[in-house]
Structure formats: C-alpha cells, structure tokens
Image (spheres, rainbow, N blue to C red):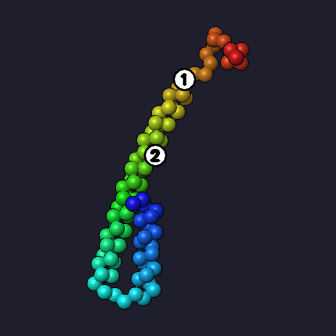
Amino acid sequence: MDVEAHLLDLMSRVRALEAGVHITDGIIATMIGITHDVTQLRNEIREDLAALGDEVAALRRHIAAQSASLHTQPLWTPGSPSPETTT
C-alpha cells in the first residue's frame, strides 16, 4: 500500500473514532494499530529527511570544491588569446 492510500485509510479510521463510535476491543486494537502505523511512518520520514540532509550537505561540499577550483584557475593569462577572439 502506498503512503497516500495508507494515510487516507488512517484518516478514515480517525474520523470514525472522532464520530463517537462505541469503543470495543476491536476499536482499541485498531487504535493501537493506527498508533503503530503513524509511529512507523514518522520514523520513515525522519530517516528520509536525514538522508536528504546528508545528500544536501554532500552537494554543498561538491559545489564548494568545484567553485574553489574555478576560482583558482585564471580566466585569461597574458600572452594567450583573448576570450573574446577565440569565439
């Protein structure tokens, strides 16, 4: 089940609970299941966000290294053809 369908299912369960459905053992078991599912989804999202943060940090390091490399290379040196004339 994809995340969107799973969340819709959880939302419908919560709405039923909020509507004042008589609480039975089955409802309590469902509530426990919902709590477990939400906790699991929250943990997955945290892991995904942590991985995304790592990817962004790696991209920043890569861009900084590339930028530093470009800044250390001279764009034009005396005696070489002018960049305007090489086109």
Identify the residue at horizontal 52%, vertical 33% (top origin). 67
The secondary structure type at the circle numbered 2 is helix
Residue 53 in the image: state x and y as whole percent.
42, 50
Q: Is residue 12 left or right of residue 81?
A: left
Q: Which residue is mark 1?
A: 73
Quick check: 25 left or right of 17?
left
Q: Quadrant of residue 21?
A: bottom left
Q: Residues within 10 Å of mark 2 (few under 14, many from 20)?
A: few
Disc with the residue nearer the chain's start (1 vs 2): 2
Residue 69 vs 3, above or below: the answer is: above
The correct choice, above or below, for 41 with respect to 33 in the image is above
Instruction: Determine the image quadrant of residue 27.
Output: bottom left
In this view, the mark in front (1 or 2): 2
What residue is shown at x 36% (from left), y 55% (from top)?
47
Side of 44 relative to 64 (left or right): left
User: In the rendered image, which residue does mark 2 sit on?
Assistant: 56
Give the CA separation, mark 1 to mark 2: 26 Å
Location of residue 56 in the rendering, given as x and y in whole percent from the top left corner: 46, 46
Image location of residue 57, percent across then percent down: 43, 45
In the rendered view, tell whether residue 31 sits above or below residue 47: below
Residue visible at 45% across and 39% down? 61
Label 1 is placed on what type of residue?
Answer: Gln
